[in-house]
Image (cartoon, grey):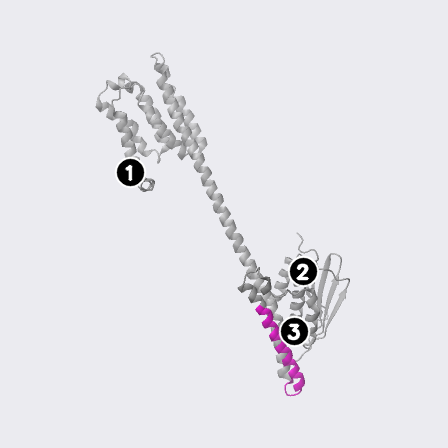
Amino acid sequence: MIAWARRHARAVDIAFVVGFAVVMMLPLPQRPAAWQNSSPLWHAILAALLAGPLLLRWRRPRPVFGFLVLATLATWAPAGGYVGHLALPIAGYAMAVSVERSLAVRDTAAALLVLLLPTLWTIPDGTAGAVLEAEAWTALGCVLGMATASQRRYFREARERVRAAELSREEEAARRVAEERLRISRELHDVIAHHVAVINVQSGVAGHLLRTDPDAAEQALHTARVSAQTVLAELGGVLAVLRHDTGAEGLRAPTPGIDRIPDLVATSSGQGHAVNLEVEGTSQETPDGVGLTAYRVVQEALTNVHKHAPAAAARVRLSWEPQRLTVSVTNEPGTSPTDPPAAGNGLGLIGMRERVAAAGGALTAQRLPDGGFLVRAQLPLEGRTS
């Protein structure tokens, strides 16, 4: 029934106004003598005058309310002070619902003051009670309208807050998805780039030495094969995490950290580079994120040495301080004639900067006066600082 009434709101409103007009025309015995003694035609005219404007009360709420206040005054004496105020609460309700609260209060106060004017001639006749009744009905309609408007405004604001919260949750979810995609792409880059660069360099070395030094070529191919196996194993670990719930710790490969850096240096030393590891200070326990960041910085820096300075000597230094770990990788200019320096897209340095910044540290990457290159990451041992 309610749904049908909403679909046919205009028809329901017309039926309501017509029914209201009919009720106004009925010769009920409790109505004053002035009304009882008038003709049915006069009843119909008053009903049309006072009920007809109600059809426009939602489109023109303030003009309709003002008109009915004045029409009530104009028909007060002929109707015996009874009929006009029946339409006022309906018009007042529509006005108070449709306009701002300040306007509704102002219009209500003005209407009540205007309706007091008949007391100038009704009090001597003893009919001031009709004026007070009209005032009461008018005030009641306006107050109900303002209360309804306040309730609607409250629910509207509540819905807007819910929509804003949903939008905020969606934006937060999208942000987390973007961050996770960035993290995954960074992991894949770090896992693949280092070993692929080694495979590329060692394949070039093998091709160059295949006829002149078969034993060295075989060693280079062996190194390339080991790198290929390593990258497949690490890539499998990353993909296993993506395929399964992140809570399945048994499926997650061990996270590389500080303790894996010597192995990384040893692997790079066997790939045509003289890579030395230096440790200053006393090693300390590091958060997983800091250890992984240090490992990835060394890995990416040595990858860049493979790509941009073939056969260059490099030095990895870990400097421990009470609240900070400094990781630096320095290499000499490349001297290998086997391959030209590989072209880079700069994503390695960008990834390193993002990793170090996420850990609360700072990264320095600069070319040295002798043509070498320095990468230095300073990482807080307490994790990310705000």
Q: Which mark is residue 306?
A: 3
Q: N-terminal of the two: label 1 or label 2? A: 1
Q: For numbered disc 1, what is the local secondary structure? A: helix
Residue situated furthest top in the rendering: 124
Could you classify mark 2 by the number of other residues whose Cα lies within 10 Å: few (under 14), some (14-19), or many (20 or more)? many
**Residue 222 belongs to the span the image colors magenta:** yes
State the image coordinates of residue 81 (x, y, percent, origin top left).
32, 19
In the rendered image, the vertical position of residue 264 relative to residue 80, given as above or below:
below
Q: Name the residue under label 1.
A: 11
Q: For numbered disc 2, what is the local secondary structure? A: helix
The nearer-to-camera label among 3 and 2 is 2
Q: What residue type is labelled 2?
A: Val
Q: Quadrant of residue 193?
A: bottom right
Q: Mark 2 points at which residue?
A: 290
Q: Which mark is residue 344?
A: none
- Region in magenta: 209-236
Majority secondary structure in the magenta region: helix
89 or 237, which is in the foreground? Answer: 237
Q: What residue type is labelled 1?
A: Ala
Give the residue drawn at x 66%, y 81%.
Answer: 219
In the rendered image, the vertical position of residue 321 relative to residue 112, given as above or below:
below
Q: For numbered disc 3, what is the local secondary structure? A: helix
Q: Which amino acid does label 3 sit on?
A: His
